[in-house]
Amino acid sequence: MQQEITERLEKLNPDLIQKSIRNYIIYKLKMNGYTISTFARKIGVTPQCITNGLRSPYPRIQREIAKIIGEYPEDLWPGRYDESVKGNRRRGSLKNKNTTGGEKININDLKKSK
């Protein structure tokens, strides 16, 4: 039921919902004696990582926030999780991925051609 209400409200004004969730989380962190900076230090990340986790999908940060305030990540961010309670976004390595959109070029081949 709560997820239905959240989905309806997100259709009306998604920014308002995100701000409300963010404010609720910051409030709960303060109730547990943390600011964004002190919480970031506790889990070994920068405050910007926490801010990114509040603004957009960031599974590790979402799990840490939910754990410290005693809730489940899928309850705090229902739009970021599917029915199987798996995050809709995975953070992965860009190693061996072509991020330029062009053809992969081997540097050794360039050196040989000169």
Image (cartoon, helix red, strand yellow):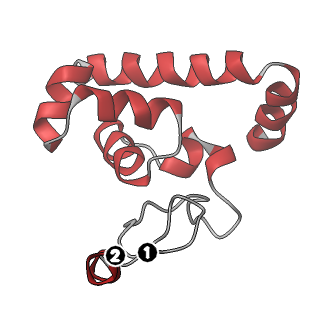
- Quarter of the view holding residue 77: top right
Looking at the image, which residue is at 50% across and 61% down? 99
Label disc, if present, on residue 105 of the rendered structure = 1
At label 1, the amino acid type is: Ile
Which x, y percent locates residue 36?
Answer: 26, 22
Looking at the image, which residue is at 28% across and 40% down? 68
Of badges 2 and 1, the one in the foreground is 2
Pointer 2 or 1: first along the chain: 1
Which x, y percent locates residue 96?
Answer: 39, 76
> Which quadrant of the rendered structure holds the N terminus?
top right
Residue in the foreground of this view, choosing between 77 and 88:
88
> Within 10 Å of the Cα at label 1, are there few (<14), some (14-19), or many (20+) other Cα atoms?
few
Q: Compared with residue 62, is residue 11 higher up or lower down, i.e. above or below?
A: above
Asked whether the viewer can see residue 34, the reply is no
Looking at the image, which residue is at 38% across and 27% down? 51
Q: Which residue is mark 2?
A: 110
> Which quadrant of the rendered structure holds the C terminus?
bottom left
Mark-to-mark CA distance, 2 and 1: 8 Å
Label 1 SS: loop
Q: Are marks 2 and 1 in contact (CB under 8 Å)?
A: yes
- Quarter of the view holding residue 43: top left
